[in-house]
Image: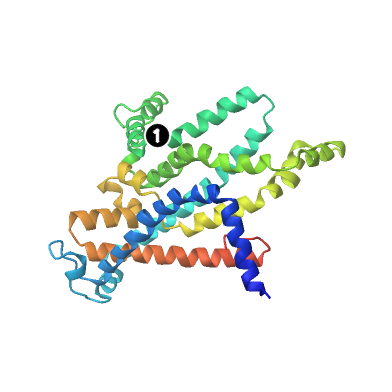
Amino acid sequence: MINIGNKGSLRRGTTYLKYWDLYLMLVPALLFILIYKYLPMYGVVIAFKDFNIMKGIMDSPWVGLKHFRELFTFAEFPRVIRNTIVISLMKLVFGFPAPILLALMLNEMIFNRFKRIVQTVTYIPHFISWVVVGGIVIDLLSPSSGMVNKFIEQLGFESIFFMSDERYFRWILVITDNWKEAGWGAIIYLAALLGINDEVFQAAKVDGASRLRQIWHISLPGIRSTIVILLLLRIGNVFDAGFEQILVMYNATVYNVADIIDTYIFRVGLGQMQFGLTTAAGLFKSAIGCVLLLIANSIARRLGEKGIF
């Protein structure tokens, strides 16, 4: 007599054989994750060693939690943490709703040709490197030859050093990040909106519901699970404030408001060769992100959502 456990294993084995070609398609993705995500995790031991390039990771002496103690007592670290959190929260508050609103507006467009043009124009910036975008922004906001300052001068005001002014720099990061990524993020929400049964909208029209009512009571609830999952992922990456963007755009005059964990690791790790200290900072960042993700996922499940796991 075959027990239930053996039956389950046999059923899974049959499923694997039946859909072997689909599982085979997973192999490149799994190999990519294994090689570029999991294998490099071994390098985190540098955070607990006095790493020497000539000796290598294995032969470098252990120092325990020395680098973490230095990190938390380092004068610049509280400022770096504060900048990372502030910039991430600004991007979360002003950037997370942007693709949702864009997707809702695109979904409401009647003319398909115009809709495709708008969608293409909005998601193309995603494929432009931050190096190119940073150069364009710096040129546009240049105090001497920038188009924005030329317009300000035409209005009778003095030119503004946007890229060197702490009052404006964070907002420049938020605006350029929205411009570059909102269209790409809207694709996921558009796909979720297409999954809503059109008969529900037809019934709402018969009942006299306006377009805004349909958006509020049908479209948004229909993509709520997608919004929750992407929000959880965003919270888990709250300490990723945009390394490439900030590295390209910032300068020494705005370090006080723009230097985040990643740029600090880059400057100190490569500039001062303190690999152990910067690895400790990176490990600290990853650990906090993991904890935040677990907490947010738990809250989502308590509120009735599926969550990530």
Instruction: In the displayed orientation, state which residue is furthest to the left.
Output: 54
Residue 305 x/y as whole percent = 66, 60
> Hey, which quadrant is residue 85 in on the image?
bottom left
Residue 43 x/y as whole percent = 29, 63
Image quadrant in which the N terminus is located: bottom right
Residue holding disc 1: 128
Q: How many numbered callouts?
A: 1
| Residue 236 relative to residue 146: left or right | right
Instruction: In the displayed orientation, state which residue is furthest to the right.
Output: 207
Q: Residue at x 74, y 45 (%)?
A: 218
Residue 182 drawn above or below residue 30: above
Name the image colouring: rainbow
Image quadrant in which the C terminus is located: bottom right
| Residue 213 relative to residue 30: left or right | right
Q: Residue at x 21, y 54 (%)?
A: 270
173 or 157, which lies in front? 173
The kind of residue tagged 1 is Ile
Residue 188 x/y as whole percent = 57, 43
Pointer 1 local density, CA inside 10 Å: few below 14, some 14–19, many at least 20 = few
Residue 131 drawn above or below residue 25: above
Residue 146 drawn above or below residue 162: above
> Hey, which quadrant is residue 39 in on the image?
bottom left
Residue 179 x/y as whole percent = 47, 37
> Hey, which quadrant is residue 102 in on the image?
top right
Dot 1: what SS? loop
25 or 195, which lies in front? 25
| Residue 207 relative to residue 230: left or right | right
Q: Residue at x 75, y 36 (%)?
A: 211
| Residue 273 relative to residue 10: left or right | left
